[in-house]
Amino acid sequence: MSGTEVQANTYTVPGGILGLKGPVQKPMPGTLPLRGDLAHIALAGTHLAAHYVIPHVAKIGDQDTNLHLMPRDDSEITRMLPAGSAIEVLDVAGEWVWICVGPEGPSGYCKADCLAN
């Protein structure tokens, strides 16, 4: 994925009973789109979360955007996403959005006004 074109990924809710087959190593923060309360729907068969979300496809706006580890201005910046990059929005909380580049990550937070309209 080049990161410049929005790809229309189609995610669906898995059928049948979901369950983990054994222990799963917790990923490093900022990698997989996984929090204790919420995870990307593509992780439903492999990682446990209270809820799963089918993301909304979006793009970074006209300026490069920093991806933060936490939804705070003073949070560690884990990477920079170039202007126009395709992303997936997982959660919105006030002026911050939790986003990922795809189900394999990376994931993090940016300000909602950094997204293209």
Image (cartoon, helix red, strand yellow):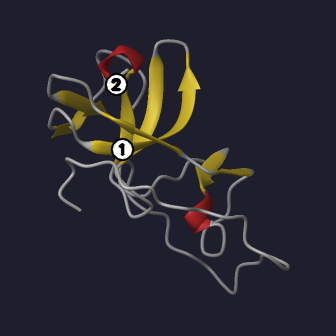
Looking at the rendered structure, the kind of residue marked 2 is Leu
Of the numbered discs in the image, which one, if any, rests on residue 64? none
Looking at the rendered structure, the kind of residue marked 1 is Ile
Q: Are marks 2 and 1 in contact (CB under 8 Å)?
A: yes
Q: Tag 2: Cα neighbours inside 10 Å, few (<14), some, or many (≥20)?
A: many
Kindly identify which residue carries mark 1.
87
Q: Tag 1: Cα neighbours inside 10 Å, few (<14), some, or many (≥20)?
A: many
Query: Outermost residue toward the bottom?
Result: 21
- Where in the figure is residue 80, as x and y percent of width and height? 16, 37
Of the numbered discs in the image, which one, if any, rests on residue 115? 2
Which one is earlier in the sequence, the residue at label 2 or at label 1?
Answer: 1
Q: Nearer the viewer, residue 5 or 92?
A: 5
Q: Which of the 4 quarters of the picture holds residue 24?
A: bottom right
Tell me: 114 left or right of 80.
right
Total labels drawn? 2
- Where in the figure is residue 23, as x and y percent of width and height? 62, 79
For the point 31% across and 15% down, which residue is it? 73
Q: Nearer the viewer, residue 65 or 75?
A: 65
Q: Which of the 4 quarters of the picture holds residue 117?
A: top left
